[in-house]
Image (spheres, grey):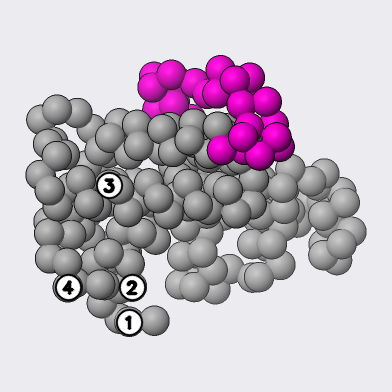
């Protein structure tokens, strides 16, 4: 992977990425913006009832429309936060997808569309998925940049992300429950520091 891409993801604020998006030839900036927001949009789409390729399609369409609108000057910072703009696009794409599925008789279209939250609830869902995305990024950075054992990180992921019982995880990984509690406490402390820095990269949200 390109060193500049990694550096953009690690250190560049969303504001700077937005400035770079004005250059249609700068594929690295687009890749960094895509990597930062695609997982969140996909997770939001899944929260709204889409699965698999449908959620992936919504994320793709949302990002493409956002960049097109942004380069056309339709997004203005003073009119609202970036997340509000992206959430609005994603919500309409999900509604379109639900209606399409209804036409294919996969789900009742009217019922599915009625379940789509309004913008304020959508932003709440976005915030929750942003938190999860940041935590996962922090775990990956911890894995790459520290000497924390892989077993300890796996235990943390399974207990925190997968919500598996501590005793079951301990048995699978050849650890004791005490080992997991101790390592989880240490990892949590380190992750807070990493996550705080990562969160600052989303300041335009």
Q: In the rendered view, does 53 fall on the left or right side of 89?
A: right
Nearer mark to the viewer, of 1 and 3:
3
Name the spot of residue 54 as percent of width and height, x first: 58, 48
Is residue 188 in view? no
Image mark for residue 128: none
Residue at position x 32%, y 54% from top? 64
Asked if the magenta segment contains residue 77, the reply would be no
Name the spot of residue 10 as percent of width and height, x first: 32, 64
| 97 up-or-down from 33: above or below | above
Label 1–label 2 contact, CB within 8 A: yes
Image mark for residue 25: 4
Image mark for residue 66: 3
Name the spot of residue 29 as percent of width and height, x first: 24, 66
Gap between marks 1 and 2, in whole Å? 7 Å
Considering only order in the chain, which callout, 3 or 1, is on the residue closer to the N terminus? 1
Crowding at label 1, few (<14), some or many (≥20) Cα neighbours within 10 Å?
A: few
The residue labelled by disc 1 is 2
Considering only order in the chain, which callout, 3 or 4, is on the residue closer to the N terminus? 4
Nearer mark to the viewer, of 2 and 4:
4
Image mark for residue 6: 2
Considering only order in the chain, which callout, 4 or 1, is on the residue closer to the N terminus? 1
Residue at position x 48%, y 35% from top? 96
| 162 up-or-down from 97: above or below | below
Gap between marks 2 and 3, in whole Å? 23 Å
Label 2–label 3 contact, CB within 8 A: no
Q: Which portion, as a residue range, is magenta?
A: 100-126
Crowding at label 4, few (<14), some or many (≥20) Cα neighbours within 10 Å?
A: few
Gap between marks 1 and 4, in whole Å? 16 Å
What secondary structure is found at the residue carrying circle 1? loop
């Amino acid at each position: 992977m390109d060193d500049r891409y990694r550096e953009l993801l690690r250190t560049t604020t969303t504001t700077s990425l937005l400035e770079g998006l004005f250059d249609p030839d700068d594929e690295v900036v687009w890749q960094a913006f895509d990597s930062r927001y695609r997982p969140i949009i996909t997770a939001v789409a899944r929260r709204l009832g889409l699965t698999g390729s449908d959620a992936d399609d919504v994320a793709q369409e949302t990002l493409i429309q956002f960049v097109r609108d942004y380069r056309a000057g339709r997004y203005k910072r003073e009119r609202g936060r970036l997340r509000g703009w992206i959430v609005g696009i994603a919500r309409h794409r999900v509604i379109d997808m639900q209606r399409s599925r209804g036409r294919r008789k996969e789900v009742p279209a009217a019922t599915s569309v009625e379940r789509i939250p309004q913008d304020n609830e959508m932003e709440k869902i976005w915030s929750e998925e942003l938190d999860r995305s940041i935590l996962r990024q922090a775990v990956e950075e911890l894995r790459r940049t520290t000497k924390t054992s892989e077993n300890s990180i796996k235990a943390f992921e399974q207990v925190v992300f997968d919500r598996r019982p501590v005793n079951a995880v301990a048995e699978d990984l050849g650890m004791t429950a005490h080992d997991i509690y101790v390592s989880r406490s240490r990892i949590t402390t380190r992750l807070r520091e990493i996550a705080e820095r990562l969160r600052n990269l989303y300041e335009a949200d």
